[in-house]
Image (spheres, rainbow, N blue to C red):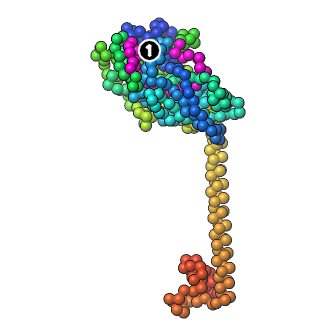
Amino acid sequence: MPEFNLETPVAPEAFDIARPDMPVPVDAFRFDAPTRFTFGDAEEGETKVRLLARTGDPVEHWYWGQIVHDFDGMVHADSIVLDWCHDDDDILGYADGFEIADGELWLAGKLLHNRDGDRVSWLTKNVPRGVPMQASITARYDVAGDTPPMEFIPEDVSTEVNGREVAGPALIARRWRLIGTAICPHGRDGNTRTELSRGGRFVAPPQIFRPDEEAEPMPKPAPAADDKLTAGETDDARPDDVPAENSASGNESPGKETSGNEPSKLETFAAEFGNEKAAEYLLEKLSLEDARKRHAEHERTTADEKLSAAKAENDELRAKLDQVESQLAAVADAHSEETPVDTHGGGDPKKPSKFRRQLGDAVGSFAEHLAAQRDG
């Protein structure tokens, strides 16, 4: 592959199959489409959400041309971030449910309310009223396999993807990683190139398989360390505006994905505080230092609440024990005044005492013991 300056490369305006080794703009890995939402009830600052992230149909993309994502080859972390228009500082919540239904990709998760009148409140109030929105996924093509992750089918050739017939020329993402999903106003077309994308950064292209050529297998990634590069990136080529999530070789075994030694703010927060608290602190635009202070306060409060709950439970049990002992002592006193109790082994051993007859063997035995102690 030819070397190029990743900051100011000479790159084509659009993908050209005759030049597959040319650098690719980072925002060419985003794909927008109209979406549909289902909201649940808001509970404790959270609203459950289900949204359409991607149909199984090809889209006409400003860089790739006609492209379709094969859902059979999709991998993802256990949860991914939901943000506003790919803004790392505007986190809406997270998705931890992934479903392919009728050839469409649906996500389920939670939107997190930060305050009254915030963006999440606006969405949950106005989307049901008919305000059109769209979902924009971020994808990477670094999933290892025997052939390159993308396939090009030429004109006059067709194949089936997601149960649909796709005719060439078209690109098929056969193996790909879902990194994150943005929610944007409908009409902000990420499939159309903008002036912003013209000044953006570039990364190395994914490998592309052509059925009419013998393809070399995609190299297996090196064993994962705490930090590793994703295929198709270099240390200085990680796009600042593409959120990085936990990578996974499959849906059930996600591993941490970073670039060089510089994990993103989102990765750092998620690693320290967990996905839910990371989203909460990013919503409030806290610095890492302030987030650590807030989290330490949260953990102290949680520990104090657990300690108070344990103390209250212990006090309740002690009060119940004192009450039982008092009741048993009163019963013992009452019976001792009516009939002397044989506490020294005399009398008929087969005949139960009044304590045992009225209180049962276990409690009656305890009452006999109290009476014996009292009588000396």
Residue at 30% over, 13% down: 212
The amino acid beneath tag 1 is Gln
For the residue pair 229 and 249, the one nearer the viewer reads as 249
For the residue pair 241 and 367, the one nearer the viewer reads as 367
For the residue pair 185 and 256, the one nearer the viewer reads as 185
Q: Is residue 223 above or below residue 147?
A: below
Give how far across and how far down residue 265 sits, in percent: 57, 28
Give how far across and how far down residue 213 sits, in percent: 29, 14
Q: Is the magenta stretch mostly helix, strand or loop?
A: strand
Q: How crowded is mark 1: few (under 14 residues within 10 Å), some or many (20 or more)?
A: some
Q: Which residue lies furthest to the left in this view?
A: 214
The answer to if 172 sits in the magenta stretch is yes
Q: In this view, does 138 lie above or below 323?
A: above
Residue at 60% over, 81% down: 358
Provide the residue span drawn in magenta. Answer: 165-192
Q: Is residue 156 above or below residue 78?
A: above
Element marked by disc 1: strand
| Residue located beneath label 1 in the image | 66
For the residue pair 49 and 146, the one nearer the viewer reads as 49
Give how far across and how far down residue 352 sits, in percent: 54, 86
44 left or right of 21 in image: right
The image quarter in which residue 318 lies: bottom right
| Viewport quadrant of the N terminus | top left
The answer to if 194 sits in the magenta stretch is no
Residue at 65% over, 50% down: 304
| Viewport quadrant of the C terminus | bottom right
Give how far across and how far down residue 208 sits, in percent: 37, 17
The image quarter in which residue 35 lies: top right
